[in-house]
Image (cartoon, rainbow, N blue to C red):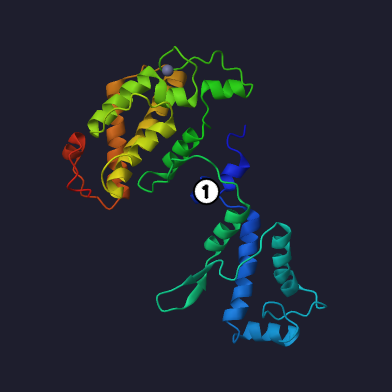
Amino acid sequence: MRWVSWCKIVTPKFMGGLGLGEIRSLNWAFLAKWKWRIKSCSTQLWARVISAIHGSQNNVDNIPLKKDIRGVWKDILASTKDMEKAGITESDRWGIVTGEDSSSMFSVTLFREEVMKKIGTKVNVAPFRWNAWAPIKINLFVWRSVIGWIATKAALADRGVNVRGTTCSLCGCERESVQHLMATCIMSKAIWWHIFSWVKIPFPLNAQSCQDLMGIIQQQCGSSKWKRVIEVVFFATMWRIWRSRNDIVFNNAKLSVTRTVTLIKEDAFLWVKNRSPYGSLNWGRWCDFNIRDVIM
Ligand SMILES: [Zn+2]
């Protein structure tokens, strides 16, 4: 079963997607790099060979090309036409990075970003930001939660899977949708209440979704690094709510709010300590969330 649409997977992260990259833009970027190289490295042997074959006259964009000579070079330059067919007019500036010493380099990544800005579809998953202080697996999980693509009972039932009831695994009352499980379930709320009070942010009574919860971070006072730490804590909370839910479904476990909250504190502590510049974090002070002087 495919949970996330291909469009969301290939769309760059800055446009809300997973950033796997679209193969067509990668191809165009590699071909564009050749065009940049022949213009900027025209004295190199290979460039002189191309010029000798194709001549310096009769060229397009100052790139040597005799149209009646077939071969790889003609195919490389044909990428411009392919892009035009896709509705893109390539700019000379695309992918060019100027260094401090005024030297220029070609960046395949930047070129692809320009292409995707023109032809990509923005995936509306705001407010979600990738956070390198949490493991990739967790980022991916939260991203999927925010766009509503995790295998809750309701999501499975909507896709025709027989799940023998769609009642929430945590509270046993409401339909188990992503937003219910993560934000509005009374049991999740109990966990969130502990977490909000621990990080000293007023509990948002009206939060209805993962997006609402993540959005609260940006409304807080404090540095971007501070908000990033809070974000790691929120990621850990969503991850542990999901793990607890799975423990109930697959292992017949009982939910312990206290135990889950402790695990969230441990997860977030280990991630921030090992993945951020704040390796000197102290567990005792972390438990009181008394770290404002460490993370400025
Ligand atoms: Zn519930």
Residue at x 28% of width, y 30% of height: 196
Q: Residue 127 versus residue 148: which sits nearer the camera?
A: 127
Q: Residues within 10 Å of mark 1 (few under 14, many from 20)?
A: some
Residue 246 can be seen, yes or no: no
Residue 203 can be seen, yes or no: yes
Q: Quadrant of the N terminus?
A: top right
Q: Residue 158 versus residue 210: which sits nearer the camera?
A: 210
| Quarter occupied by residue 187 | top left
Element type where label 1 sits in the image:
helix
Residue 182 left/right relative to 193: right
Residue 86 left/right relative to 97: right
Residue type (three-letter) at the residue carrying disc 1: Met
> Disc 1 designates what residue?
15
- x and y percentages locating residue 195 in the rendered image: 28, 30
Q: Residue 40 versus residue 277: which sits nearer the camera?
A: 40
**108 lies above or below 282:** below
Ligand 1 shows up in the quarter that is: top left
Residue at x 19% of width, y 44% of height: 292
Q: Residue 127 versus residue 20: which sits nearer the camera?
A: 127
- x and y percentages locating residue 102 in the rendered image: 44, 78
**268 lies above or below 57:** above
Total number of numbered discs in the rendering:
1
Residue at x 31% of width, y 32% of height: 264
- x and y percentages locating residue 22 in the rendered image: 61, 52
Label 1, ligand 1: CB separation under 8 Å: no
**98 lies above or below 9:** below
- x and y percentages locating residue 216 in the rendered image: 35, 35
Residue 132 left/right relative to 92: left
